[in-house]
């Protein structure tokens, strides 16, 4: 009789491992699609930020001005090749949906950025400039372009890394937006 | 042609690994001598095939064969030769290949060094290693084949990740993997002992040098990684409790527990089932680490390429390997009885405390690492666990561990007579306190409680470790390599603890913005920006700043921090300007051009940081030194190895 608890003791490791295996299996099942790296920010308050506006007026713009509305935040730079690639898609989105796209021009030259937007078209409601990269660090940006979706309470709802595509926009952004924002009012 | 040859070699290696597993495990079980004899040739064949496969991929890199997808994704025509070779482990597929090659190397070493062990036992060890190798090769071939071709071939490659274009990183993965994979040898020895149903602790002696070797490599690998992130990531951090870092740290903690517990099992025949379990858990944590890193279930700054489709495959293999081992343990371990007791203040009980505290530390790190995963699985939502959790929970078991080390090192086996070493204990503690107070009040301003505690503990460890060797030398007794190695490792630990206690509270860090000719004072040093100019590297262009650092008007050095733009990936990289002055790092990383000739910069003064690397290097050296101890020499026959155990048994019987 007394031998029993003794034997059970040696079953503890494997029992613990079985539990762990279940957690891992669930983890794999819930893990994001290939290529999508979850941001630790998702489901959390977006970092508070405020940056100079690109127009050169010296005004600043930031999270305070965006309270109470949905917005798409796009981090880009003229030096970034994939950003050029996604530019037409951003222009298309700006035409179709009424959710504003806010740009953070990261580590960039203001003159070049203005030049680029004049030539290629400007999908952004406001473009702010992050010269020293501090705001981008707060947002956990480590490769441009990165695009965030933020809800009226200031919570980050979604993030994608790499060029915006119609598929990503349809599947991951539109599906999370309330219906009234899908069509452009005009 | 070469990639196809490589893939063919890889398939053959997998088949040979399978044969090695079957011959090695089934041979002894079915008592087929021919099967047992066939294990070693299978090992040799597998090694040759692995080397061929790796050679083919390296050749494709060196010859710019951009028709191979892996080469196109991780190389470029402008990439220097050195990085074209190290690009082999620049991403997932090649890393797996390197992993299996290193396993093949360890296996060959085991086959070579165990010729004097009982044939059945060594066959079983090789069989278990063959099984692990088979699993990984199957995984590599099915989900991560590095030899896939591109149709049509890429005109040029998209370059190696700039972060990886650094000598520190080039050496980090091979060394780290050597440690990781080395734990597989201890795992295989433990499995072989259980398969055989051995109840004697001889296997502990056979396993010990392998465990120490793996541990020493793991120590080097972790240190290299930490050093690399310190000076290339540009933010001057050396440890971030990132999942990937934790994945290497947990096996290290358990491995440290294992080498101590093996000592008890070898010397005294105690803790048998516990030591077995540690050997299993050490490698299991390596596997789990691989799973966490490669499957993308955890978010990490290091997951350069995460792919959940691979997660399932690793998970299946993980469950089979660890599940079988633990089932074997549940079956065999109850038969292991420890004979002989020990007193509370004997060396055994101090090593027991060491094991408990190290395992608690590993468990807290593990809990923090997988907490986000559990939260996700039960649907609580996103959870991120960082330094605010890890630091206090890790310190909790570590502080008593360090204190007990300084006491326990004076204790004797079996019978504790600490009163005999009371004088040594008190003298070393007194000296340590004096050193700590002198440092805190004299050298660095500001009194931090934890810094004092850390300094006392670190100094106490160094002084205590030196007592026994000095005593032996004075009495003209021989100092065995084992004792010397242990002393080195403990002194290394003490140095690391002291360095950590100083670096953490006394680092001065400031973000400064300077125009040409301006200077800023950071921690008593003046940083003056002389100017910036553009320079070109082999595959990047950079802005290089010239910063003169002076103290009290005396120029100390000129630093040249760089901000690099790698052409192909259009990715930025930083190269910090670092000058080491008596162990203190003066560090400047170049930030951004603020316009009008002004640059943002991050300046840091990190005192004693050099010793943070030196400590672990000493620890690893201690491990390698202990390996060369006479007891583990090849020539020693099994009978000789059994001698002290027999003596121990007699002693117990008496």
Image (cartoon, helix red, strand yellow):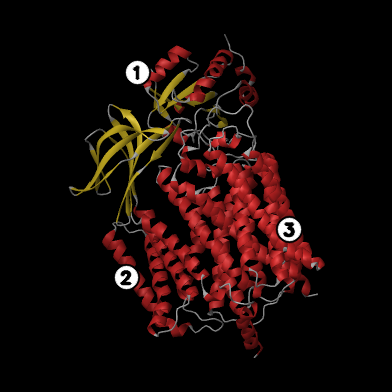
Foreground disc of the pair 3, 1? 3
Query: Residue tagged by mark 1?
Result: A57
Residue at horizontal 25 percent and vertical 33 percent from the top: B515
Q: Percent from the top left, x then y, of residue B188?
A: 67, 63
C-alpha separation, residue under disc 3 versus residue under disc 2: 58 Å
C-alpha separation, residue under disc 2 versus residue under disc 1: 61 Å
Chain designation of label 2: B
Q: SS at mark 2?
A: helix
Q: SS at mark 1?
A: loop
Question: The N terminus of chain B lies in which quarter of the figure?
Answer: top right
In the image, residue B341 above or below residue B42: below
Out of B187 and B234, give the one closest to the viewer.
B187
Residue B434 numbered mark, or none = 2
Q: Percent from the top left, x then y, of residue B635?
A: 58, 75
- Can you see residue B298? no
In the image, residue B551 above or below residue B220: above
Foreground disc of the pair 3, 2? 3
- Can you see residue B176? yes
Residues flagged by tags 3 and 1 on a common chain: no
Q: Earlier in the sequence, mark 3 or mark 2?
A: 3
Question: The C terminus of chain B lies in which quarter of the figure?
Answer: bottom right
Left or right: where does residue A7 sit relative to residue B497? right
In the image, residue A75 above or below residue B511: above
Residue farthest along the top direction in this orientation: A186
Q: Percent from the top left, x then y, of residue B454?
A: 40, 63
Query: Residue tagged by mark 3?
Result: B21
Q: SS at mark 3?
A: helix
Chain designation of label 1: A
Q: Percent from the top left, x then y, of residue B324?
A: 74, 59
Out of B578 and A38, give the one closest to the viewer.
B578
């Amino acid at each position: 009789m007394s031998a029993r608890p003794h034997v059970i003791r040696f079953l503890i490791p494997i029992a613990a491992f079985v539990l762990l295996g279940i957690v891992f299996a669930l983890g794999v099942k819930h893990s994001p699609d290939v290529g999508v790296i979850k941001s630790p920010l998702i489901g959390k308050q977006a970092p508070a930020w405020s940056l100079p506006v690109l127009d050169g007026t010296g005004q600043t713009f930031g999270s305070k001005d965006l309270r109470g509305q949905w917005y798409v935040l796009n981090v880009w730079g003229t030096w970034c090749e994939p950003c050029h690639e996604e530019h037409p898609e951003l222009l298309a989105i700006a035409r179709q949906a009424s959710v504003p796209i806010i740009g953070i021009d990261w580590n960039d030259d203001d003159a070049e950025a203005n030049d680029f937007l004049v030539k290629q078209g400007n999908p952004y409601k406001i473009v702010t400039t992050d010269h020293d990269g501090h705001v981008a660090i707060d947002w956990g940006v480590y490769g441009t372009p990165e695009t965030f979706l933020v809800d009226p309470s200031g919570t980050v709802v979604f993030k994608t890394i790499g060029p915006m595509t119609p598929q990503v926009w349809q599947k991951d952004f539109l599906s999370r937006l309330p219906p009234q924002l899908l069509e452009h009012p005009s | 042609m070469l990639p196809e040859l490589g893939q063919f070699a890889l398939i053959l290696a997998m088949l040979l690994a399978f044969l090695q597993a079957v011959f090695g495990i089934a041979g002894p079980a079915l008592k087929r001598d021919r099967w047992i004899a066939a294990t070693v040739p299978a090992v040799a064949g597998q090694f040759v095939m692995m080397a061929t496969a790796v050679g083919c991929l390296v050749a494709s890199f060196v010859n710019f064969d951009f028709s191979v997808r892996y080469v196109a994704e991780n190389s470029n025509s402008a990439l220097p030769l050195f990085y074209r070779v190290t690009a082999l482990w620049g991403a997932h597929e090649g890393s797996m290949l390197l992993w299996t090659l290193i396993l093949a190397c360890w296996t060959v070493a085991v086959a070579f060094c165990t010729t004097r062990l009982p044939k059945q036992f060594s066959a079983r060890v090789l069989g278990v290693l063959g099984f692990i190798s088979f699993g990984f090769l199957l995984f590599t071939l099915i989900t991560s084949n590095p030899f896939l071709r591109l149709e049509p071939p890429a005109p040029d490659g998209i370059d190696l990740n700039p972060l990886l274009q650094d000598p520190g990183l080039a050496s980090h993965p091979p060394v780290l993997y050597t440690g990781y994979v080395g734990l597989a040898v201890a795992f295989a020895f433990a499995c072989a002992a259980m398969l055989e149903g051995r109840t004697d602790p001889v296997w502990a002696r056979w396993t010990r040098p392998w465990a120490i070797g793996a541990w020493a490599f793991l120590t080097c690998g972790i240190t290299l990684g930490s050093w690399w992130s310190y000076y290339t990531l540009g933010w001057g951090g050396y440890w971030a409790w990132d999942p990937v870092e934790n994945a290497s740290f947990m096996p290290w903690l358990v491995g440290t527990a294992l080498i101590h517990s093996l000592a008890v099992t070898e010397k005294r025949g105690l803790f048998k089932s516990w030591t077995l379990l540690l050997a299993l858990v050490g490698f299991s944590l390596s596997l789990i680490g691989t799973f966490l890193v490669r499957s993308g279930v955890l978010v990490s700054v290091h997951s350069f390429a995460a792919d959940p489709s691979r997660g399932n495959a690793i998970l299946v293999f993980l469950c089979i390997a660890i599940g079988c081992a633990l089932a074997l343990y549940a079956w065999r371990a109850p038969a292991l009885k420890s004979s002989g007791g020990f007193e509370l203040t004997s060396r055994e009980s101090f090593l027991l405390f060491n094991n408990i505290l190290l395992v608690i530390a590993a468990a807290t790190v593990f809990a923090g690492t997988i907490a986000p995963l559990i939260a996700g699985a039960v649907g609580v939502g996103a959870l991120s666990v960082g330094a605010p959790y890890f630091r206090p929970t890790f310190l909790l078991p570590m502080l008593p561990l360090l204190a007990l080390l300084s006491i326990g090192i004076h204790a004797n086996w079996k019978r504790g007579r600490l009163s005999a070493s009371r004088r040594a204990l008190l003298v070393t503690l007194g000296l340590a306190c004096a050193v700590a107070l002198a440092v805190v009040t004299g050298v660095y301003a500001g009194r931090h409680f934890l810094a004092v505690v850390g300094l006392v503990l670190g100094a106490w460890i160094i002084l205590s470790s030196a007592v026994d060797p000095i005593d032996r030398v004075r009495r003209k007794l021989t100092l065995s390599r084992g004792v010397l190695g242990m002393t080195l490792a403990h002194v290394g630990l003490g140095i690391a603890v002291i360095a950590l206690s100083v670096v953490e509270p006394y680092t001065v860090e400031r973000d400064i913005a300077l125009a040409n000719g301006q200077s800023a004072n950071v921690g008593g040093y003046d940083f003056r920006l002389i100017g910036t100019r553009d320079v070109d590297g082999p595959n990047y262009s950079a802005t290089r700043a010239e910063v003169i650092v002076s103290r009290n008007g005396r120029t100390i050095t000129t630093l040249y921090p760089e901000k690099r733009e790698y052409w192909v990936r259009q990715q930025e990289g930083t190269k910090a300007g670092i000058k080491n002055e008596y162990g203190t790092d003066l560090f400047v990383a170049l930030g951004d051009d603020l316009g009008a000739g002004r640059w943002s910069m991050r300046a840091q003064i990190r005192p004693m940081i050099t010793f943070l690397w030196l400590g672990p290097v000493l620890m690893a050296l201690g491990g390698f030194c202990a390996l060369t101890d006479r007891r583990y020499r090849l020539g020693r026959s099994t009978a000789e190895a059994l001698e002290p155990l027999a003596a121990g048994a007699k002693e117990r019987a008496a």
